[in-house]
Image (cartoon, helix red, strand yellow):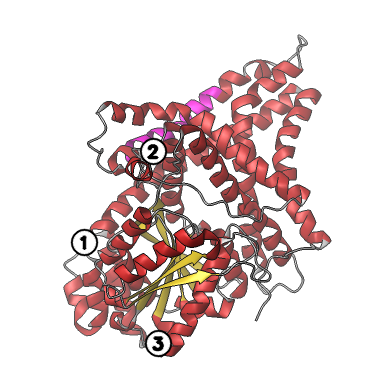
Amino acid sequence: MKNLDIPLRRRSIPYRLFEMLPATLSYGAIILLVVLSLINPLYASIYLVFVAATLLVRAVAVGYHTLVGSKRVETAKKEDWSSYLQDLENREVSLEVAQKKTTYFAKKHRENLAVMQQSGQVYPKPSEIFNAVIIAFYNEPYEVLFETIETLRATTYDSKKIMVILAYEERGGAKTEAIAKRLSATYDDTFYSFQAVKHPRGIANEISSGKGGNITFAGQYLKEYLNKQRIAYTDVIVTTLDSDNRPDPQYFDYLTYEYIVHDHRKNLSFQPVSLFMNNIWDVPAPMRVIATGNSFWNIISAMRPHTLRNFASHAQPMEALVEMNFWSTRTIVEDGHQYWRSYFHFDGDYDVVPLFVPIYQDAVMSNTYKKTLKAQFVQLRRWAYGASDVPYVGVRVFSLKSKVNFFAAASRFVRLLDGHVTLASVPLIITFGAWIPIFLNTNADRSVVANQLPEIVGLIMRIATIGLFVTIFVTFKMLPPRPERYKRSRTVGMLLQWLLMPITAITYSAASAYYSQTRLFLGNYMTTFDVTEKASVLTKEKKS
């Protein structure tokens, strides 16, 4: 088996240099602006206009992908994926029936049926496939888990073909164990199987409090269970969920369909669209802006499969997971890191298939406003610690022993690095950068461009708001119904909240990125998975 692990203690010199790279570039982007301003304001102006123009191009692309992607999500939710599975079960007669359907997915379905009928390969049938679900659970309330499991029970997929593992932590204590046993007793006969698996403390070579260790322990339990049941790994797809993740009713039908129609299925993972909409009406305005922005970024990512990576809930064939020893137990960002583990395990022959049905999640919400603001930052700094993948990828791509295609892998490395540097530096450069050449050069011979720089950058950014307006428009179409406990004025707040976007971009996105990258630079590694508090007003009322 290949060594896919992150170093647990001592790093090599190349590894440490790659660890320092994200922070070096993120701080360097700001320092470069200051240095250019001191040398010649014109140089700084060119640099700023280049950054702003790049952001403008990205904003236009964001607007386009948001519109098309949100439309595709709505179409996928309305598609009859159960009937598509029936077509795959009876392929010899299904192509003629499928001709009657005209949507984007129906066209893809006809193409898939034609390829399957002409290829001569043996494809698995839907009736042979099981879906296993691992739900990671630490100390969340019973109500949160109950609602999640109810969505699994209410799926259009046959519940007797679903295996549920409630992966709970020993460190959660007696209350956590009592909830696990209560749920196990409630749903014992609902699914093919429902099992509560306790992840022990203190397993060797695991970081403390890591989600990856919990779901890996559950995956190993599932492996032994399948062996006893004599169920082939090739017939099982595994989805990991957090306790608040609620799949669309057709998620398992859609997932099973995509698993079957791809003949290279072991080398794939499947990524649904994560939408932070469960409690969106309840959370404070800054959290709504962040949650909505993250939701639409996931939609945009689904429209760009060549850049798509695992995030939050995702699915992978059991066969591949067993080969890879499941997930990493040494990182707090096991979801995104799983992409890179898989990529190098399969020597670059690996892809992520987008699923355009949502898995709904909670936005950050604690029992007080102050705690909610803090909890949001804690969540984002954990996500931003995905910069720890930069050294993991770098030492493998730029190694003489690497078996991946260098140019394909190097381009992925550049996109990974660019994403983290952009997240940290660009909000600060765009917000404050135009004033730096002016404040650092008070002499009369400043260039005209430098004097007019704030207006130039401001004009570019006003044009770039087209992406923001598209996001606002689509947000109102995708919002869940307004709860009766709120007046119509709450809807107005949903519009005005976007005025906070520059503030959240700096105080949360940029600050969390710099925080995580700085710790990585200093070798002060983040080894604790801080569970994010997520709730609704009703959950808070029950707790009080």
Residue 339 visible to an observer of this rendering: no
Can you tell which of label 3 and label 2 is closer to the viewer?
Answer: 3
Q: What kind of element bears circle 2?
A: helix
Mark 1, residue position: 102
Residue 52 visible to an observer of this rendering: yes
Apparent side of residue 179 relative to residue 321 in the rendered image (left or right): left
Give the residue at x 76% y 18%. Answer: 440
Q: Which amino acid does label 1 sit on?
A: Thr
- Tell me which segment is drawn in magenta: 458-474
| Image quadrant where residue 263 sits | bottom left
Label 2 or label 1, whichever comes before in sequence order: 1
Q: What residue type is labelled 2?
A: Thr
295 shown above or below 264? above
Q: What kind of element bears circle 1?
A: loop
Mark 3, residue position: 231
Give the residue at x 74% y 15%. Answer: 446
Apparent side of residue 311 relative to residue 358 in the rendered image (left or right): right
The one nearer the camera, 83 or 447, is 83
Can you tell which of label 3 and label 1 is closer to the viewer?
Answer: 3
Mark 2, residue position: 471
Label 3 or label 2, whichever comes before in sequence order: 3
Whether the magenta-drawn stretch holds residue 34 is answered as no
